[in-house]
Amino acid sequence: MSRHTLVNEFMNRVETHSPNQTEFHQAVRHVAQDVITIEKAHSGYTAAKVLDRLAEPDRVIGFRVVWQDDAGETQVNRGWRVQYSDAIGPYKGGLRFHPTVSPSILKFLGFEQVFKNALTGLPLGGGKGGADFDPTGRSDAEIMRFCHAFMCQLAPFIGPDRDVPAGDINVGTREIGWLFAAYKAHALEFTGALTGKGASFGGSQIRTEATGYGLIYFVQAMLAEQGADLAGKRVAISGKGNVATHAAEKAVEAGAHVITLSDTSGTLVAEDGIDAATIAWVRARKQAGEDISHPPEDTKARYVAGAMPWEQDVDIALPCATQNELDKDMAKALVDQGTQIVAEGANMPLTSDAIDIIANGGLLHAPGKAANAGGVAVSGLEMSQNSHRRYATAEEVDADLKQIMKRIHARAADEGRSGNRIDYSKGANIAAFRTVADAIAAMGAI
């Protein structure tokens, strides 16, 4: 039976069992098409039905979140935690507060998290959670009350050896502090049940920077594979949040010319490169909940309303905003202009069509499960620090992060190498799958 037939039969089962969950189906198909023949060639994986088991999360916990706004009105939101797989360690993955949050989104993110965490080499399972709460326009007091109410519902299901959430979209260090306080009050103990905490109460150094820094370390490993480096390379980055701005910061530090940052309304463009001061300004605007449409007069950057970062002539593209942000038209533009590398800072930022176009165009494509694993890697280091009651310096954590990203690159490159070409997406999927599949097959039918 051909690989194509095997994948279609498998996906028919997945789509029947989880109808109308488009993002989840997309994520599962991307993995299945690379690993289904690996499973069929291994009697233990086949007997354990690893892929069928990974197509279903261990559990999806849903709950109501009731809280009061500043006017004293009762508000009701929906919250979820998808505990996807704990085959190699406790569930680990972020919490997202955004009106688009749904079981489909969280299942896709949790599924991806399983493979991302496996690539780090750390004992971490995969999970994801969040709520359809929109913090836009809400006061600090309202967001705090929502965090406390959310954790009252989530707390019975998490813990340092069970499930360790972290931050994600709209859940930063401040929100983690409020969530952790509510967890601590529920558990009546101080344990590392969340990561991304403030440094004064158990957090790790450079956790905020980790995903963006790790993305650049992965790209540097890709370039080193070719005997090249970042110096002088033109880099397009989408987004204006932590991942985007810290990737830009680290790229500039390495001598690259960062040509773009962006938001939902347009793109900040600097033909000669965005400088450190402008990156800091973008970060401050993001933190203040403001747009970037009016850059400082003394910067070389200009804002182009409605423009996309991928319209620029660049060597490296780093999509760091959100899922499915780079479509087939933009992928074609990158191919046509001779871009060499696309590395994902966001989770699943390329549409399926865009991935095909980039692959056929000969670009190197680093998937998010490999390239943006720096955040969860440092979260894993934070868990270790909490367990040992010993906190590492920023220099120590950064050194560990560099080594983890190099190790992820090496694993993906080894599995994806064919002659002089490396398929990083396939390599990452296979390397992660082997790790998780070995554990699942070893534990029997449970």
Image: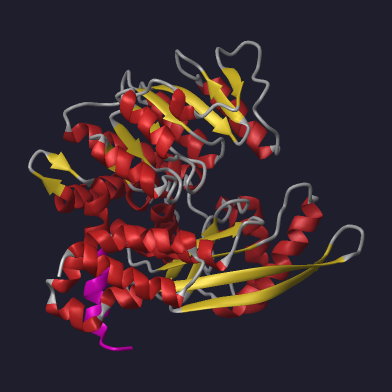
Rendering coords of residue 403 (x, y %) = 27, 46
**Residue shown at 73% from the left, 69% from the top:** 149
Question: In front: 303, or 32?
Answer: 32
Q: Which of the pair 351/201 is nearer the observer?
A: 351
Q: Quadrant of residue 45?
A: bottom left
Q: Is residue 89 visible?
A: no
**Of 62 and 8, which appears nearest the observer?**
8
Relative side of 70 to 431, left or right? right
The residue stretch that appears in magenta:
432-446
The residue most toward the bottom is 445
Q: Quadrant of residue 14?
A: bottom left
Residue at 59 percent of width and 64 percent of height: 102
Tell me the colour scheme of the image.
Answer: secondary structure
- Please tell me whether residue 51 is drawn above or below residue 204 in the rendered image: below
Residue 401, above or below 84? above
| Residue 246 included in the magenta stretch of the image | no
| Residue 376 lies in quadrant | bottom left
Comparing 67 with 280, the one in front is 67
Q: Main secondary structure of the magenta part?
A: helix
The quarter of the picture where the N terminus appears is bottom left
Residue 57 on image: x %, y %: 43, 75
